[in-house]
Structures are given as structure tokens and as C-alpha cells.
Amino acid sequence: MAIHFEHIDIRRFRGLKEVEIPGLRDVNIIAGDNNSGKTSFMEALCLFRKPSDFYNVLKVARMRDVSPFVAPAMYENFISLFPKDEMYIGMHATGGIGESVIEIHGEEQKELFNIEMMSPYDRMKYSKQSKPDIEQEITTFYGEMHGWDGRSSFRDSIRFNPFMKPSELSFRNKRYPDSINIVYLSPLAHMQGGTFNKIVKNPEYKYICLRLLQLFDPEIVDLLYLKNENTSRAIEYLEHKRLGIMPLATYGDGIKKVLSLANGIASATGGVLLIDEIETSISYKYYSEIFDFIIMAAKQFDVQVFITTHNAEAIDSMLETQIYGKSKKYDPLSVITFRKDTETALVYTRSLSGREVYEDRKSFKFEVRL
């Protein structure tokens, strides 16, 4: 499978400073404790989906936010991407994508703002707290975004404040193609619907996914999309030998999680799949079969995979998908450890091949994730 990212250098992004990760492979296990920077690393990779597109930056900024896409929250989420000590984001990547560089820098300035300049929705909310005929002092970000997207250099100025309407942001009028197909699966992606829309379009892949589902329930025989008679909306169903045709919503999180992983691989065809906290909703007794499936399916669909986990059993199971013996065949796995220094808040990383971790795991097992 293609290795789209071989080397990542993050100079500044959220809590990550001077983080360099070489030797990325087909399947990359990002191990570490909670709050060690694993999710921030995944978000940094998402910026390379459209390196020259500021709107993509805002989408990445909102990945942890469940609130509606409104201007004040959009601004706060954007500012949170910067390290606390410097308003600068910088990162560099090489690999199958070529060379890609992203830099954003600027500063916040105070300026006068009139309530009439707000959107009607924001104006209604704000007028309850302030007199509409008085100018208010607000904070506005002024800066630049520039770099290289693998094809050409780019440079755009940025002016952005909490009350700007999306239509006022010039980047909304530009059409940027994806530099690389990157799909992100959050720990709760399996609860958000659309878990097998790509699977059902490929009969061979659908059959493989059904075999995986049958580990959970051997009487599941098919995946179906059926229209609701009242709304004409397509609903996801599983066909069961004994129970008949049942909505996917009636099944447990384990089955939904597996379908979400399978659908994610199909959606990321030819690109990159980011799986955050893979162990969520999966019982350890199914780890080996599921990880075998991920590696096999990623190879079939030409997908580079990044997986975060803080679970030692999950790491072991992923390593056990490979037959590490005397044979020195190509090793598709890498294990990158994230560790955050509690005193300095700096994040340190270590990158090893799957073989290196496997051969040393008796003495290294607990340290691999810390």
C-alpha cells in the first residue's frame, strides 16, 4: 500500500512543540497515556488534507466540538489551535504526498465593532447583553497562512473575529481540491450513523465485513439499505436468520464500531485513515480478528492507517498480526510512543518498527505506551 506520510515534523500545533516523527509505515500505532498529544497529532495530519485551505483549518479546529457551527465558537476553536505561548502553527510532511508545508501566524488585536455588523442570529443573542447602538471593543485575529501544498506555494492574509459571518470570509468562495483523501474516525464515530454506506457498494468487501460481523453474531447474514415508508430516507439494517430484518440502531456498539471501521477504510481508498482510540466499544477478545481485518482491508484499498490507543492489550494484538520470526520480510507496522512531561508540558516521542517492539516487549511492554 502507498505510504502517503513518511516523515512528520510539527514545530508548533496545540500542545505539540518540536515533535518529529520519522519512519512512518503502512499501519502506525500511536501509543500513549491520555492527554499526551495523540489526538492533536491526528488533527495535525488532517490539516494536510487541504494545506492551502483556511476553511479546512476551521474544520480541524471544530473536530472536538459538538456545538453548532456558529461564529463565536468557530473563532474560539481556531485560537485554541495555537500554543499558549506563541500564535504560530508550523508543520512539514514528506512521503507519497511529496513535500508539504503549512504555516499560520499572527496576533490578536482590539478593534471597535458595531452590533449591526453581526448576523441576525448573533445580533439577537448579543443585544440581550449590550446596547445595540453602542460600538463594542472586540478581539480580531490578523495574520497569514502560507506554505507549500505539494504543487505550488501559497500565501493568504487572514482577518477573523468572533462575529464574522461565514459569507464574509473570502476562503469560503475558493474551491480547493483535496491534496490527499484523509478520513478521521473519532472514538464515537460509530454512533453518528452512515456506518456502511461505502461497504454495500462493493460486494466482495461486503462479504468480508459480514464474516467479521459474524464473530459477534453468527446469524447476521446481510447488510441492507431500505427506505423508510414515511420519510423515504434510507435506513441501515442488518438481516438476521432468526430475528429477520432489524435496524442497525437496535444492535450494540461493538457491531456499529466494526462497521464504522470497515466503512472508514472504504471511504479512505487511496488515502489515509485516522482511527482515534480504536479500543472504544470493542471487547479485547475480538482484537486479533479486527486488527487482522484492518491490515488486510487497508492493503486491499491502498490506505495508510494511523491508530491511537492507550491500551497495552490492543498494542500486543496489533503486533501479533505479524509473524515476526527469523524472516526479515517487510514490516508494515510502526509504533510511535507519546509521553508528556508533567513539569514542562513538552511532548516527547519515540518511533520504532513493529518488529523492534515485538522482539523486546517482555521488558518493554509497559513502557511502550508511556
Image (cartoon, helix red, strand yellow):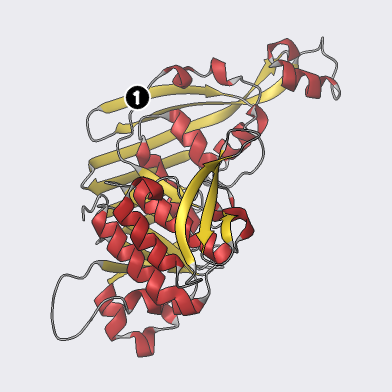
Above or below: residue 316 compared with residue 60: below
Residue drawn at the location 62% of the way across and 32% of the way down? 69
Residue 156 on image: x %, y %: 39, 22
Give the percent coordinates (x, y) of residue 157: 43, 21
Q: Is residue 59 left or right of residue 10?
A: right
Expressed as whole percent of the image width and height from the top left, the position of residue 230 reads: 66, 34
Residue 111 shows in the view: yes
Q: Residue at x 19, y 85 (%)?
A: 325
Position of 198 compared to 168: left or right? left
Position in image of residue 329 (x %, y %): 14, 74
Query: Where the N terminus falls, by quadrant?
Result: bottom left
Q: Is 305 located above or below residue 349 in the figure?
A: above
Three-letter code for the amino acid on which mark 1 is drawn: Arg
For the residue pair 270 and 130, the one nearer the viewer reads as 270
Q: Nearer the viewer, residue 44 or 91?
A: 44
Reading the image, the residue beneath label 1 is: 155
Of 232 and 358, the residue lying toward us: 232
Which residue is found at the position 85% from the left and 16% from the top?
131
Residue 45 visible at all:
no
Comparing 120 with 370, the one in front is 120
